[in-house]
Image (cartoon, rainbow, N blue to C red):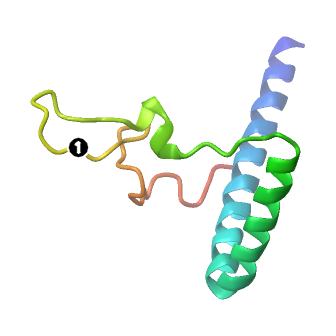
Amino acid sequence: MANERIESALRSAVYYRNYRRARDRAKTKLTHLYPDQYLALLEEERKKDELEGKKWHSIADSPAYRVSNTEGDEPRAATSSGGVAIGAHSEGNVEGEA
Protein backbone atom coordinates (compact mmCIF):
# COMPACT_ATOMS: atom_id res chain seq x y z
CA MET A 1 0.00 0.00 0.00
CA ALA A 2 2.75 2.47 0.96
CA ASN A 3 4.78 1.58 -2.13
CA GLU A 4 1.79 2.23 -4.39
CA ARG A 5 1.30 5.65 -2.82
CA ILE A 6 4.98 6.49 -3.25
CA GLU A 7 4.98 5.33 -6.88
CA SER A 8 1.83 7.34 -7.56
CA ALA A 9 3.36 10.43 -5.97
CA LEU A 10 6.53 9.99 -8.02
CA ARG A 11 4.55 9.66 -11.25
CA SER A 12 2.61 12.80 -10.38
CA ALA A 13 5.80 14.70 -9.56
CA VAL A 14 7.47 13.67 -12.84
CA TYR A 15 4.35 14.55 -14.84
CA TYR A 16 4.09 17.97 -13.18
CA ARG A 17 7.81 18.67 -13.69
CA ASN A 18 7.57 17.79 -17.39
CA TYR A 19 4.40 19.87 -17.73
CA ARG A 20 6.14 22.89 -16.17
CA ARG A 21 9.12 22.50 -18.50
CA ALA A 22 6.88 22.41 -21.57
CA ARG A 23 4.86 25.34 -20.26
CA ASP A 24 8.00 27.38 -19.59
CA ARG A 25 9.34 26.65 -23.07
CA ALA A 26 6.02 27.71 -24.61
CA LYS A 27 6.01 30.94 -22.58
CA THR A 28 9.54 31.70 -23.72
CA LYS A 29 8.59 31.19 -27.37
CA LEU A 30 5.54 33.44 -26.98
CA THR A 31 7.69 36.07 -25.27
CA HIS A 32 10.00 36.14 -28.29
CA LEU A 33 7.13 36.19 -30.79
CA TYR A 34 5.16 38.93 -29.02
CA PRO A 35 7.61 40.99 -26.91
CA ASP A 36 5.46 44.14 -26.69
CA GLN A 37 2.36 42.28 -25.55
CA TYR A 38 4.43 40.25 -23.07
CA LEU A 39 5.92 43.37 -21.49
CA ALA A 40 2.50 45.05 -21.32
CA LEU A 41 0.94 42.01 -19.62
CA LEU A 42 3.91 41.69 -17.26
CA GLU A 43 3.58 45.33 -16.20
CA GLU A 44 -0.19 44.86 -15.74
CA GLU A 45 0.39 41.85 -13.47
CA ARG A 46 3.05 43.71 -11.52
CA LYS A 47 0.66 46.60 -10.86
CA LYS A 48 -2.06 44.15 -9.74
CA ASP A 49 0.38 42.53 -7.32
CA GLU A 50 1.44 45.91 -5.93
CA LEU A 51 -2.22 46.83 -5.34
CA GLU A 52 -2.68 43.54 -3.46
CA GLY A 53 0.41 44.24 -1.37
CA LYS A 54 2.56 41.54 -2.98
CA LYS A 55 6.16 42.66 -3.41
CA TRP A 56 8.29 41.70 -6.38
CA HIS A 57 11.77 40.94 -5.15
CA SER A 58 14.77 41.41 -7.36
CA ILE A 59 17.13 38.47 -7.75
CA ALA A 60 19.94 40.92 -7.04
CA ASP A 61 18.39 41.54 -3.59
CA SER A 62 18.59 37.86 -2.67
CA PRO A 63 21.54 36.85 -0.50
CA ALA A 64 21.59 33.48 -2.30
CA TYR A 65 22.76 35.22 -5.47
CA ARG A 66 25.34 37.54 -3.91
CA VAL A 67 28.54 35.69 -4.63
CA SER A 68 31.92 37.40 -4.54
CA ASN A 69 35.58 36.49 -4.29
CA THR A 70 37.13 36.23 -0.86
CA GLU A 71 39.84 38.63 -2.03
CA GLY A 72 37.32 41.40 -2.69
CA ASP A 73 37.97 41.49 -6.44
CA GLU A 74 35.25 41.40 -9.06
CA PRO A 75 32.19 39.32 -8.15
CA ARG A 76 32.12 35.81 -9.59
CA ALA A 77 29.23 34.57 -11.65
CA ALA A 78 26.35 33.64 -9.37
CA THR A 79 25.32 30.02 -9.52
CA SER A 80 22.16 28.15 -8.79
CA SER A 81 22.10 25.42 -6.16
CA GLY A 82 23.20 22.93 -8.82
CA GLY A 83 26.40 24.82 -9.55
CA VAL A 84 25.31 25.95 -13.03
CA ALA A 85 25.86 29.63 -13.75
CA ILE A 86 22.60 31.54 -13.72
CA GLY A 87 21.50 32.12 -17.28
CA ALA A 88 23.62 29.23 -18.55
CA HIS A 89 21.88 26.56 -20.58
CA SER A 90 21.90 23.06 -19.15
CA GLU A 91 21.37 20.10 -21.45
CA GLY A 92 20.35 17.73 -18.64
CA ASN A 93 16.97 16.00 -18.91
CA VAL A 94 15.97 17.86 -22.06
CA GLU A 95 13.42 15.25 -23.08
CA GLY A 96 12.13 14.54 -19.57
CA GLU A 97 11.40 11.20 -18.00
CA ALA A 98 8.42 8.95 -18.41
Q: Residue at x 79, y 22 (%)?
A: 6
Residue 62, above or below 94 = above
Q: Is residue 81 visible?
A: no
Q: Quadrant of residue 66?
A: top left
Give the number of marks: 1
Q: Quadrant of residue 90?
A: bottom left
To which residue does mark 1 refer? 76
Question: Quick check: 5 left or right of 93?
Answer: right
- Looking at this rendering, what residue extends furthest in the top direction? 2
Residue 71, x across and y down, in percent: 9, 30
Q: Residue at x 69, y 74 (%)?
A: 39
- How dense is the environment of label 1, judged by Cα within 10 Å: few (below 14), some, or many (20 and up)? few
Q: Residue at x 22, y 43 (%)?
A: 75
Amino acid at the residue labelled 1: Arg
Q: Considering the image in quadrants, where does the N terminus appear?
A: top right
Residue 80, x across and y down, in percent: 43, 40
Question: Quick check: 5 left or right of 33?
Answer: right
Closer to the camera, 94 or 60?
Answer: 60
Residue 37, above or below 16 = below
Residue 54, x across and y down, in percent: 79, 41
Question: Quick check: 23 left or right of 94?
Answer: right
Q: Quadrant of residue 45?
A: bottom right
Element type at marker 1? loop
Residue 79, x across and y down, in percent: 36, 41
Q: Residue at x 70, y 46 (%)?
A: 17
Q: Is residue 78 visible?
A: yes
